[in-house]
Amino acid sequence: MTGLLVAAGVQERLADFVADCVARLEHPRQRANAELYVRGLLAAGPRKSLQPTLFRLGVSSLERVDAGYQSVQQFIADSPWSADELVRACAERVAPQLEVTAWIVDDTGFVKDGRHSPGVKRQYSGTLGKIGNCQIAVSLHAVGRRGTLPIGWRLYLPEDWCADAERRRRAKIPAQVLFQSKPRLAAALVEQAAGWEVPAGPVLADQAYGDDTLFREALDGARLGYVVAISPRTTVFAPATQFAVPARTAARGRPASAARADRAAVSVAQVARELCAHDFQRLPCATAPDGSIRDGRFALVRVYPAHRISRHAKSPRAEWLIIESPEDADAMK
């Protein structure tokens, strides 16, 4: 009996949680269909298609099943409602319970057959570890001591998909959806979540995102700290670089407005090679499976991303370059 009471309590709490989240939907029928759909996804049974789900939920009349199917199917496929509002409602309720320590940007591949599902093509997926026929979604997760929570995701549409009007029409992709790179999608997710009542943390991302200068600038613009991996080939200006706008040398024409560096940009690999052993200090950096803390040797160097200045003609913006030295590099020159 005690187990049944506990289960009933959990069921009531879950029902209240779902009702609170879907309350942001404007139409009563949308809210009812949303609750029904969630109940169906959580119900026992191997098949999650709508008609078996409605039977499991106690809809016994075939006529009522058909009516419910049409209503829920229309809600999922065609009804105009904002998924972001539901994600926000869930995030603002759950994330404060996680003791958030970081936000993580990543992408996930979903294996697909055929070529008609939105965004599907042969492309590299880190999830698969190889090139395969798949869809890819960019995601943002809040990670904390008590769990993790997705707080945003976007389907990545490759350029050839965006340029194919017929495939877009068949897949019901709205005309306003244009091509965006994965870093652009990630930046939009971060900027959106930064405006919600969600505990923030430093943004973590791998090289696929960290190499993008505009992505890092978007994080800075959202006033979020970040630790992202970059390629050793990424070019920067060294700490001692001086920047100045060139003096006007001609009487006609527009004067220069972009600052220029007094030296050439170098790769971050070159910056690392020029450091000495005493530039590094030992810091805790990882937790081993047995709970022990692993140390690493790190150097922090203040640099200026070259791409921002040379490609986009923007003012210099300093970033911390974090360099980890391998353990066998004690005698660095």
Image (spheres, rainbow, N blue to C red):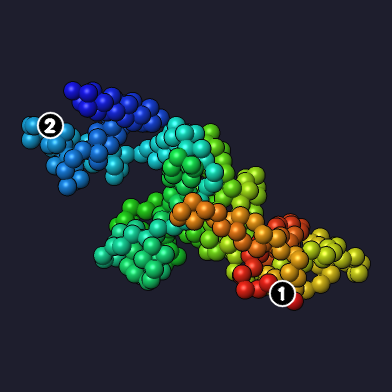
What residue is disc 2 on? 59
The kind of residue on which mark 2 rests is Val
136 left or right of 269 in image: left
Q: Is residue 45 visible?
A: yes
Residue 184 in view, yes or no: no
How far apart marks 2 and 1 lie (CA) works out to 72 Å
Residue at screen point 73% across, 61% down: 301
Residue located 36% across and 39% down the image: 80
Closer-to-camera residue (137/70): 137
Other residues around mark 1 within 10 Å, as few (<14) / some (14–19) / many (≥20): some
Which quarter of the rendered picture does the C terminus lie within? bottom right
Q: Quadrant of residue 265?
A: bottom right
Where does label 1 land, which residue?
332
Relative height, residue 20 to residue 115 (above, below): above
Residue at screen point 30% across, 59% down: 117
Q: Position of residue 221 (x, y in %)?
A: 65, 47
| Pointers 2 and 1 in contact (C-beta within 8 Å) | no
Q: Residue at x 31, y 62 (%)?
A: 111
Query: Of residues 179 and 297, which is closer to you in this image?
Result: 297
Q: Looking at the image, how many numbered discs can be counted on the residues? A: 2
Q: Based on the displayed image, in which of its 4 quarters is residue 249 positioned?
A: bottom right
- Going by the numbered disc 1, the residue's amino acid type is Met
In depth, the one of 131 and 245 nearer the eye is: 131
The answer to whether residue 50 is left or right of residue 321 is left
Q: Nearer the viewer, residue 165 or 137?
A: 137
Q: Where is residue 259 shown, x and y percent of the image?
A: 81, 62
For label 2, the crowd category at 10 Å Cα-Cα, with few meaning under 14, some 14 to 19 and many 20 or more, is some
Q: SS for tag 1?
A: loop
